[in-house]
Image (cartoon, coloured by chain):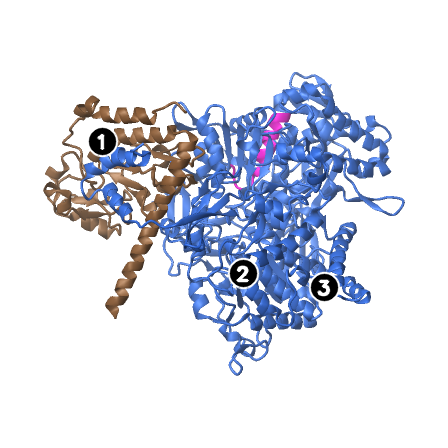
Chain colours: A blue, B brown
Amino acid sequence: MGLTRRDFIRASALAAAAACIGAGGYLATRKEEIAKVLPIRTKDFPVGQCRFCAVGCTTVAEAEVDESGKIVKVIAIKGDPTSPVNRGVLCTKGFYLNKALAYEKRPKKPLIRKEWINPATGKPDLKNSPRVTKGVTTKDPEGLKPSEVDLQENFVEVDWETILEFIADAMEMCINEYGIFSIGYYGSGQLGTEETYVMNKALKGGLPNNHIEGQPRMCMASAVVAYLQTFGRDEPYGCFDDIDVPDPDYGVHADTFFIMGNNTAEAHPVLFNRIATLKHKNPEKIKIILADPRKTRSGTVADLWLPFMSGSNLSLLNAMLHYIVLEANNIKRVVDVDNAKVELNDGRVVHLKDINWKYVDIKFIKRHCNFGIVTQVQKVWVLNKYGGTRGEVWDPAYKLGTKAQFFPDPRKADKYKSEEEIEKDWWKGFAMYIKFLEDYKPEKVADIVFRGETPLKYDRAKGEWVEIDQAEAIRLAAKWFAEGYTVSLWCMGVNQNVQGVWINRAIHALHLITGKAVKPGRHAFSLTGQPNACGGIRAPGALCHALPYGRVVFDGVNRKEVEDIWKKNLANYLRKKGYSEAEIQKEIEKIKIHGKPGPHTIEMFRRYGAGQIKIMFISTVNPGQSLPYAYVYRKAMAGAEKSKPWPLTITLEAFPSTTTLVSDIVLPAASWYEKSFTYGNTERRYQYIRKIMDPPSKEMLPDSVIFAMIWRKMEERGIIPKGFISMFWPEEYGEDWIKKTIENCHKPEWIDKFTENLWNELRELSNETPYDLSGITRKRLKEKVSGYRMPMPEEYDTDPDVRARYDKYQSRITYAYPYDPHIEKHTKRALENLKKWAPLYARWVEKNIEETKNDLEYKRKEKLPDNYWISFYAACKPVYKRKQLPDGSKVPIIDCRAIIWSNPHWATYYDEKEQKFKIFKKVKIIKKKFNPEKAYKGLSAGPLPFDKIEEFEADVIGDPERDLNAMFTLVLSPPEVPGVKIAYRKPDGSEIVIMDARDYPYGVCTGRVIEHWHTATMTNRVPEINRVLPEAYVEINVKLAEKLGIKDGDPVILESPRAKIELKAKVLDPKKALGGPRYDYLFVPWFDEKKLIGFLLRDNFDPFSFQADYKMAAVKLYKGTLQRKQAIAKPLTVA
Amino acid sequence: MKKGIKRRDFLKFYILSPLLFGFNTKKDEELEDVVRPPGASRGFSRKCVRCSACVSTCRNVGRYAITLAGLSKGIRNLGTPVVENMREYPCDLCMECTKICPTGALKEIPKEKVKMGVAVIDIDLCLGWNSDVCLSCSKVCPFANDVFEFRSSEWGNQPYIKPDKCVGCGLCVKACIVRKTAVVVYPPKKYREIEREYLMYLDYIESLPNLNRYKVVYEDNLPRILEIGIEREREERVLRELKKRKVK
């Protein structure tokens, strides 16, 4: 055909338009420009998972190549059309990724602040440098200087030998003086799995101090704990396919989406596009519920907006459960908890089993779930006195006042005398659960949930948003949830909350009660933020309490399992190197995992501020910007003690960032396609990232190599066992190993082999665990760019049935046959363990699993394959722990049944006599002081290295049942309620004020925007992106703006009790605009290093997951400008 | 193949269309052929006395959106206010210029009644139409929900601007993340001239079967979006080189 489509289109439809504009027209000129472009030679190179969010789009780099086919320059990153994750689609961040990596001012050589240089020798010096002798530093805690300028002006370049020697000297000095618990590491879910593993192994098995954390603590920890407490294993059980891929048997996928605390459209755009596409094709059938204090951009496809007050998530979710369980089934109240008798609306009293359940999937919960009832939760405030940069702080610590019971209770499984007794216990649990839900009638909690805002429903016929009644909105959401094939999506809005774990559990409860779990298209899907949070931190256990693949440091059996693998591999390596057996024995004896968890992220940085931790390693993360109340932690990092070289902040970075502003040493890291490693995304999919080109400088090294070199130095000094890390080197080097390593590590085959060695040890550690990825060999990963979903056990190669099922379903759903490739093995093992000490209970569990196996009617109704069955084969060791058998061995208590938790929003307790849940009006107040000496002894977990000052109980002021403000002093979240004074009556009649936010009537929330990735160290360096969104702003609801006389674009000041900041106002009307916050809520994007919004936030955290709350800080808002445009911190006060 | 216009049909239709509709095109003298400041009333160029008060007001409020038309806009428009460089200085509808206009050529009207022009997304350049997800333009639109429609598909989120709702302020032009913007504001008159063809083109692209769309996106548009970038970079390199030489 002579006329190609392109020519035709150009020439006709649009060019004709261009002609209309005339010679100067836009299209015509562009046409000329296009004609001028010289043809270039390009080639596609598959790379692997995108560097940014957890969706994990598979990417291809298009590069300009020379005649020999070598890359001259990468022109663009494109989506891989064959990938099941993104099907070729990318978002703008990914599209411009190559431009970020091409940024010219990346650190290219090891850098150290100039004050560390001894003028006499010209080398960095721990004793005789101005930094130590005079105590001076150029670190900038205020964050005033652009990071790239700081990097150029205040640092000097040194070579790798020198800097490694310096770091090793500092570590040795620190360990000799203060012991091993003075060194910490803050890592990242953006590092490759292998890279983090080097640090994890060294700090858990080498030093060993468990002082390892990562920003997934601030991102996913709440979801992790909730998955563990509900299912016993931390991974979403479904995958992306649930959203829009028809399942191979019945062709079903989700038709209802419950989006809570997650702006999918901007934070996970490619995933959102899959949902939006579904909605666009079938707007009537697909229902989307947006539960969020902001009507985010994700609201463009929503049918219902539930604008609850940030922190009131639990009241909303419990009210939805109230409708589903009580109202939909005409249950008025529970009359007899022990015998599970309820009174119906028509006055009849019946046993729960006689109810013809609507919405509640009674078969599912009866066969596969237990009840976990929180029988008591008291509000507890702890005043922690750290001293140093953090001073003292009130932390909510309701964990200390929480008690729970299980129905039935597998911990006492051997006490049950008959199956009837177990069943009676189960029904009692259900009755108690209903009793708990009685308090959450939609009308009753509407005030707490919405606090004066009105929900909106989209009227498709009129094409506009209309207001609906608060309680009705809750009911409608619950109804849609229960009627559809529902996928829930949530992210930071839920996790970053002081009740994050419980909110997560409540979402799981909604799915379990309605039976919308472990079935195709029915899934409670926690979205991760980081590209490798699941694969690199969560599963391999790179947090202070964890060990690889579901193990924990405080479990002796787990410790031994990991130690044994490490010992075996080290012995093999040393044997190969020709060590004698005695020497080998001596080295492997040193491998011992410390049994106490280290400090969690906030705790670690508080201790850094208090001067207990002396050296902090930071990699690929920007805590100087991303920590809540960042100012005090910036001060911690920026400290400079006179006559001592502490604190010493060592950062591995590929870009200048607000953390390099407060770092002493910056080690230049290679990034993304300049090295090779493995990422695991939020749907359990592992993808291998290929090295396609060299970094701009040969001295920019992969993080894995930098870490390994540091620890190899420590091996040489006898601080960690010989060969413990150096065993991963692909080649043996002599004395000049640093030089040789730097020379060779940019060869693709070198770094590939190096990371493969690490990957193989990880596979070995995962083998036989519920996280089994031993079948995902490096060879396989290299063959398939879009990777594999785990679990993929070794049996894939040996067992034809496992292989056939994996090939058909690709581990689409775990805990359910036929999707889960190793369900039989794990179920069998769990039941065998249970049979050893509680045969009756084990038989009952087995019987229940059998019932689903045989219930064809149920399965056909639910559109499940005939061979389908369920077993939550990891549930629930993290909750029930272990059982010691008479022979002394300890078996994990796993009964293959998920736990449905009751999750109170306010302090409450169960009155056994009256069989009633009551408000717990006594508040416990504890004051304690941090004791560094105890911390140096390794007593790192939770409350241990503290000295208690006093403890007493105080009374709530006012009647929480009538007075909303009194109620807000008893809710467990948010800690700081805008406009409310949190105070209690002490026993002596005086008042104790925890915090007073009466002058701060609005809430502020931080979050992401589509253009920028987190703290924008990369995306801010892309001119195209930066011109679109150069600086942060504040989103204000139109009603509030009118009240305060603020117009769009006005400069306004946000002031919290901790800091203030000037921002440009962006006035939005949720009804009209693409989004907007509720009337008393503000949103500020988080990316801008010139506007450190983190200064305004409180650094409180969930006492179960230790994840901080970024979504609710009380502020006031007024028009005006400030001289300093960066956020200004106020002097430190209590609270 | 999906229902819709086949390429061949489209060809036929295109050739025939001027015959069918061409003579019907209403020649509305009142429609502007340049992008005017907001609130331009009917018969603007007759009422405008070219006093340039609006231009200075716009500068005073720090916007720099309004400039005076040069000869390229035609002798009739010479010296009248226009909003030209929307890539850098779009109009954010502060409506200050309308308050200063001495002749009533610019009138203060509600923002949603403004009609400076119509923003048109070049779907061959737009990332959202070429296998990417991007929201940058819609996020800045003051009437986002009313103006923007997303025809989300496997090929991206496919934003579409409703011509009857768009006021033509150009904020989206500034916000476009493609190096050389994929959104342009057409003056009302010119938009009327291209509307039919543009809509046909949208339908045509949307109705393409997957394989063809793949070719359009991956073999045609993406390279073109990228080539523009390269071209610009080369241009910059040459300019830098020239500067260096001059300095010497």
* Residue A746 image label: 2
- Chain under callout 1: B
> What's the residue at 75%, 28% (across, down)?
A849
Q: Position of residue B175 (x, y in %)?
A: 34, 45
- Looking at the rendered structure, the kind of residue marked 1 is Arg
* Picture residue at 72% right of the left edge, 66% below the top: A722
Give the percent coordinates (x, y) of residue A189.
57, 51
Of residue A86 and residue B91, the one placed in the foreground of this image is: A86
Q: Is residue A293 visible?
A: no
| Residues at marks 2 and 1, CA–CA distance in whole angstroms | 58 Å
Q: Secondary structure at mark 1?
A: helix
Residue furthest bottom as drawn: A120
Residue under disc 2 on the same chain as residue under disc 3:
yes
Which quadrant of the view contains residue A843?
Answer: top right
Up-down relation of residue A330 to residue B162 (above or below): above
**Which residue does the numbered mark 3 point to in the structure image?**
A934
What segment carries the magenta color?
Answer: A308-325
Residue projecting furthest to the right: A886
